[in-house]
Amino acid sequence: MSHLFGVAIESLVAILLVVTIGYCMLLNTRLKRLKADEHSLKATIAELITATEIAERAIGGLKHTVRDVNENLGNQLNSASEMSLQLKKQLAESENVVRRLSRIAVAARPPEPQPATPEATPAKAVAAAAQAFSDRRRSNGLAA
């Protein structure tokens, strides 16, 4: 009986060894797959790092471009404001010139016949023309 008992134990140990070898083979397959995944993951991480560096450089370039555009736009806005002020001054001056010219034109019209005192009408026209001429001479010394 001791012999049978020894064979049973040896058989049990052999079966356990076969199961252990099978399990080791399964683990080996899984470890190979894990290693392959690790290499794939490392490659993906390297690509991600490269893409991040490229994006950072692009963002830096965009910041520089925005700064340049902001400076140029600021200069153009200042120039436009100055031009607007100059145009307003010129428009005001042109209104003065038109007003003076209209006075001169009114003064230079031939008098309309009036039934009352014919000599008083030419005198008023001469006085209006003189007034318009003196206004023209007074405004910054410009003769329009």
Image: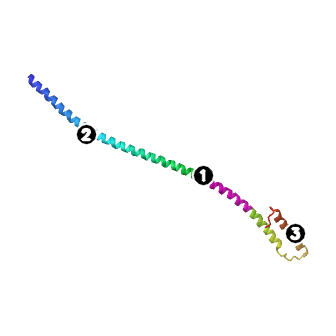
Name the residue located 22 percent from the left edge and 37 percent from the top edge: 25
Precedes in sequence: disc 3 or disc 1: 1
Q: Which residue is mark 2?
A: 29
Q: Quadrant of the N terminus?
A: top left
- Residue 61 percent location from the top left of the image: 51, 50
Residue 121 is left or right of residue 102, and the answer is right
**Residue at mark 3 to residue at mark 1: CA–CA distance:** 58 Å
**Residue at mark 2 to residue at mark 3: CA–CA distance:** 118 Å
Q: Which residue is mark 3?
A: 127
- Residue 90 percent location from the top left of the image: 73, 62
Precedes in sequence: disc 2 or disc 1: 2
Q: Residues within 10 Å of mark 3 (few under 14, many from 20)?
A: few
- Residue 65 percent location from the top left of the image: 54, 51
Q: Which residue is mark 1?
A: 71
Residue 96 is left or right of residue 123, and the answer is left
Residue 64 is left or right of residue 49, and the answer is right
Could you say whether the residue bearing mark 2 is in a helix, strand or loop? helix
Q: Which residues are magenta?
A: 70-92
Could you say whether the residue bearing mark 1 is in a helix, strand or loop? helix
